[in-house]
Amino acid sequence: MATITALLDDDIPEVAQFLTECWQQVYIDILDADVLATITPEYRSAYLRQHMHDGATGLLARNDAQELVGMSFYEPSHSPILIDACLIDKLYVQPHLIGTGLGHTLLVATENAVIGRGYTTAGLDVYPTNLRAISFYQSHGYKQVGTAVDHLAGHEYPLDVMAKDLAKS
């Protein structure tokens, strides 16, 4: 069973390491190796700190031993596709825990937190080749509403933009 808590500034180094490890495993067949090499804990720490300074926040999932096993990160959307939405910028669980229900628990907790911030729409983006993630979000009511491009380390990757009306769920 996982305990869900708020992301605090003191958690950033641990979360940055967690995200880096997740990216190395999850995106190995999606992103170029030189791009993955730029996604370091230091890069992630700076990203998280800057976005938290600009109003982002998140949730952590910890197991009974208090080990970090999942996280989400959400913020007001700046996308013209997701107007007046809250962007779920990150939602990850340890790869070996995919399919255990932890992702569902974390997504529901995140959606509830988003509603608590006054939003009625949650949005996110996902690489179109990440079929497992697309299926996961579709099974939770998210629908594709557009496309975008992710610019990482001199590369461009297409993104599917998905959204869910939280007032209807």
Image (cartoon, grey):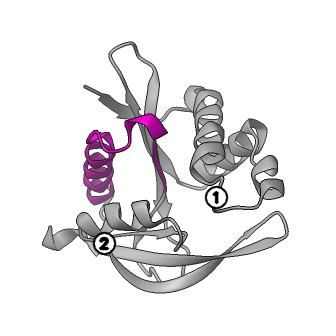
Query: Which circle, 2 or 1, is nearer the viewer?
Result: 1
Q: Amino acid at mark 1?
A: Asp
Which residue lies under the disc numbered 1? 29
Q: Do the residues under discs 2 and 1 have CB atoms within 8 angstroms?
A: no
| Percent position of residue 97, x then y | 38, 36
- The residue under the point 81% across, 48% down is 37
Nearer to the camera, 68 or 33: 33
Kindly identify which numbered label has been placed on residue 142: 2
Name the residue type under label 2.
Tyr
Say whether residue 163 is magenta: no
* Residue at (46% x, 55% y) in the render: 74
Q: Residue at x 47, y 40 (%)?
A: 95
Report if residue 94 is visible in the image: no
At horizontal 52% and vertical 52% (from top left) the residue drawn is 56
Vertical comparison of 64 with 103: above or below: above
Which badge, 2 or 1, comes first in the chain's sequence? 1
Quarter of the image with the C terminus is bottom left
Does the stretch in magenta take in 91?
yes
> What is the secondary structure assignment of the residue under circle 2?
loop
Q: Position of residue 164 (x, y in %)?
A: 29, 73
Farthest top residue in view: 65
Can you tell which mark lies on residue 107?
none
The span picked out in magenta is 90-116
Q: CA distance from mark 2 to mark 1?
A: 24 Å
